Image: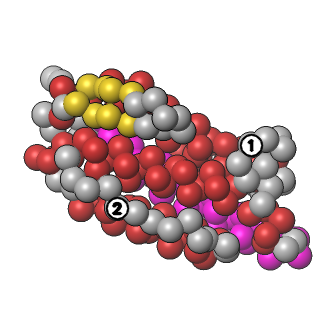
Amino acid sequence: MTLSMYQASIPVFKQMLGGLSAVLAKAEAHATAKKIDPSVLLQSRLYPDMFALLRQVQVACDFAKSVSARMAGVELPSFEDKEETFADLQARIAKTLAFVESLSAAQIDGSEERKIVTQAGTPKEKIFSGQSYLLNYGLPHFFFHITTAYAILRHNGVEVGKKDYIGSY
């Protein structure tokens, strides 16, 4: 049995974004219980030159929606980066999930050889096949930002574990 491009992407994005949503809910509850200003957690980072939690969540959502859109051959939705609260981040995750869930297997399957061109953080464009884009670029970047968001919260004392990170499957 083969694994389709849809199976290798959409369920993964849904599972991990669901886990991220649950971890953020625990972080907000932690801040309330410990009387910590939520912005302290939202602006926390692991090292000064890394993105803060807020930006990690935004970028994770950006990868989920952009990878899905490019593989489906549809226009990339544009979300403004204006989130400031846990509620705002939850709304962004929900909006990302709604977009990802709107794509069908028929739109994504068969995209293995689709030519995908990106200009990630540099004026040089990168050209991928759909399969290479998903497996070697999109998913690794997505997981990096999900993992870093989790690590920031764990580092700041939020009681989360592997089950929280993995989410429901």
Q: Is label 1 in a helix, a strand or a loop?
A: loop
* Image quarter of the N terminus: top left
For residue 83, side relative to residue 91 (left or right): right
Q: Residue at x 43, y 37 (%)?
A: 119
Q: Residue at x 32, y 40 (%)?
A: 9
Indicate the position of residue 25 as horizontal and vertical percent values. 63, 67
Indicate the position of residue 155 as horizontal and vertical percent values. 82, 47
Q: Residues within 10 Å of mark 2 (few under 14, many from 20)?
A: few
Q: Is residue 16 magenta?
A: yes
Task: Decide which of tag 1 and tag 2 comes sooner along the chain.
Answer: 1
Q: Looking at the magenta stretch, what is its main secondary structure?
A: helix
Would residue 51 be seen by someone viewing this image from the given angle? yes
Task: Give residue 77's mark.
Answer: 2
Indicate the position of residue 21 as horizontal and vertical percent values. 55, 62
Q: Is residue 111 above or below residue 25?
A: above
Q: Which residue is mark 1?
A: 50
Q: Residue furthest right?
A: 35
Q: Are marks 1 and 2 in contact (CB under 8 Å)?
A: no
Q: Residue at x 84, y 44 (%)?
A: 48
Span of residues in magenta: 8-35
Q: Is label 2 in a helix, a strand or a loop?
A: loop
Q: Is residue 83 magenta?
A: no
Q: Based on the displayed image, in which of its 4 quarters is residue 54 positioned?
A: bottom right
Q: Toward the viewer: 88 or 22?
A: 88
Q: Toward the viewer: 100 or 84?
A: 84
Q: Based on the displayed image, in which of its 4 quarters is residue 148 positioned?
A: top right
Indicate the position of residue 3 as horizontal and vertical percent values. 22, 28
Q: Residue furthest front?
A: 123
Q: Residue at x 23, y 35 (%)?
A: 5
